[in-house]
Amino acid sequence: MRHSIRVLPGIAAAGTITALVLAGCASGGGGGTGSGGGAGDSGGLTPVTLQLQWVAQAQFAGYYAALDQGYYEEEGLDVTINESGTDTVPIDEIAAGAADYAISWVPKVLGSIEQGTNVTNVAQIFERSATTQISFKDAGIEGPEDLAGHTVGSWGFGNEWELFAGMQQAGVGLDDITLVQQQFDMNAFLAGDIDAAQAMTYNEYAQVLETVNPATGELYQPEDLNVIDWNEVGTAMLQDAIWADAERLADDEEYAETTVAFIKASIKGWIYARDNPEEAAEIVTAAGSTLGTSHQLWMTNEVNKLIWPSASGGIGMIDEEAWNRTVEIAKGTENETGATIITADPPETAYTNEYVEQALADLEDEGADIVGQSFTPIEVVLNEGGN
Amino acid sequence: MPSLDGLVSAAGLVGSRLRTRTPSAFRWRRATLGALGLLLLAVVWELYKALGPEDGVVVGGLTVLPRTTDLAMPHVWDVLARLGQPVNSTQDTLVWQAVLGAAVFSLGVAGVGWLVGVVVGLALALLMQRFRTAESAVLPWVILSQTVPLIAIAPLVRRWGSQIEIGAFQWENWMSVAVIASYLAFFPVAVGALRGLGSPDAIHTDLFRSYAVGWWTTLWRLRLPASVPYLLPALRLAAANAVIGAVVAEVSIGLRGGIGRMIIEYAQSGSGDPAKTWAPILGAVLLGLLAAGVVALLGLLLGRFRRGEVSA
């Protein structure tokens, strides 16, 4: 039996190695996504976690600018920005207590609210929709009514509703088109597998314009494309908004105050991005985005166009008409399985202007321009590959 | 009482000493063949690109072979040249450096996952081998665990992890990825080790029992050595699973720094800069090769016990 003793040191050694490896990696792992400093030593600041709906890119320039410029700190907040993966549902992070605020599209959240998630839209940052359906001129698709008989791309997962609503309005059924699941890149569109592809003005549209047209040897030009803009068709839905935990808003006074401070600092970040698009793009790249330089600047500029000038009375204000339209489309548009996003009106807690109004009043007192009436977008020259 | 070593030799458990050493010429030939294989792949790629139809091979409306355009299949040399250029115009980092860094990061996370998976898998196998009841109770769950889709557990693991805070220790996102990697890695180890531990012939276990040798000694002297031929393929499978698990979990929960995240990030420039998209894929291949290499090294250390491998 003397040999049996030897096993134990072996197991102990294995255990120690595992522990050492874990400990060693704990200090070396550069996996932290937030650049807002450790939550442990916040020096009297309120720790706040913001959950984005995708990885760092200029779509979220305002939040990164607010962090970089110290606006959050000025408001007494220690903000950590969490990026999303393909399977992260930002709203679920709030519900699970892993985030205090989240950025998400309104239609996606309406479904979650109907399923019982108790969250509130406290600031509608993007007033306009950035979703379009683009096609090459020779396909002759100028409006949703022309989509019939064509191959139409969509990313699905809640990105398809404006398209379906636009088609429904134009009397084009889902049977009249061939719906294709679209990838992250625009290769299927460029290869001709998709006639009309979904494209965000700030991302995929630019991807096409960064690609060399084999016919001319130069980059594709806006003149080569037809763009169906859902804002013009009238089926645009509200996109990036700041969502908060509805229960905590009602019960937790401190959280309600933090919400006002968070919205205020975030809006200051967006004002910074409006007035300094080049710097804002650089801040996002420094925060870890690997997008090409001209692509990042293009995205900053296009996102600014979605916000400024504000027609709702100030950035972040939720326009009742736009909200109601979004809800109507969410209730009345059927997807390929015959389902709608929601079946009944959302509860009253689904949105409120209470906090954003306070934030805007504070900002106006400080002399900030919250409407951006004189906003003019810059001219961005896209380079091949977005570089 | 006869010496245990004698007993073990009698049971024929020590690796055959007749095993001939691999001549170095043979090893060189293998390395050359491996390199040739890579070259051949590049040649086939370019040949198909040059000779294949522009629109790919379509059978009955289904594309069975890809298009040969630069967009779908960039030239091998374009991909290699892209590796030597900066990631984008504001960064000095070259693509190959970024890819290598990401591969090392992912390898580290997958390595931790693999280690945890192997420890857990071995522990489960020992438990199941020791207690028959445990086998009946645990094995179905072990198998069932692998039917849960990764995309379902990844966000859960991350969320649970983010709420763990013990003293100065704070759960980080990369640990969630490692946990998911270990979740895929432990399965082949548990199943392989269980089979391996049960593989000694009845005549050998009976011999040990007739000499009143305890369970631990039987394990150390008989079962563990006998399990090596089953364990090594299981470890290799576990390494592959850990790498896949780590890469997929990175994509799933959005962990920054690794190959998985790099694949989706570079895919965004997939249309304008097709050669760039292939860089992290090469990184993933490198990652798999490295992981397999580490396990092969382990196999060399355990060479004494390898008497023909049996796949798990």
Image (cartoon, rainbow, N blue to C red):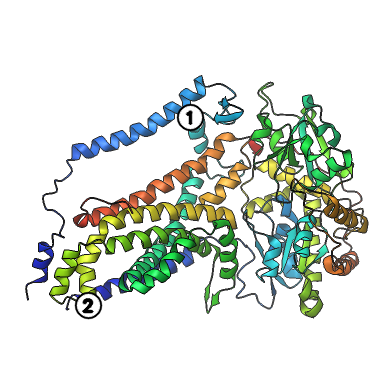
Badge 1 marks a residue whose secondary structure is: helix
Residue ID at (13%, 53%): B16
Which of the 4 image quadrants contains residue B139? bottom left
Badge 2 marks a residue whose secondary structure is: helix
Mark number for residue A5? 2
Q: Is residue A3 left or right of residue A139?
A: left
Residue A10 vs residue A162, the one in the foreground: A162
Category of crowding for the residue at label 1, using alpha-carbon neighbours closer than 10 angstroms: few (below 14), some (14–19), many (at least 20): few
Mark number for residue B77? 1
* Chain letter for mark 2: A
User: Is the C terminus of chain A in the top left, top right, bottom left or bottom right quadrant?
Assistant: top right
User: Is the N terminus of chain A in the top left, top right, bottom left or bottom right quadrant?
Assistant: bottom left
Residue A292 vs residue B219, the one in the foreground: B219
Amino acid, disc 2: Ile
Q: Is residue B132 left or right of residue A136?
A: left
Where A323 sits versus B126, above or below? above
Q: Is residue B84 visible?
A: no
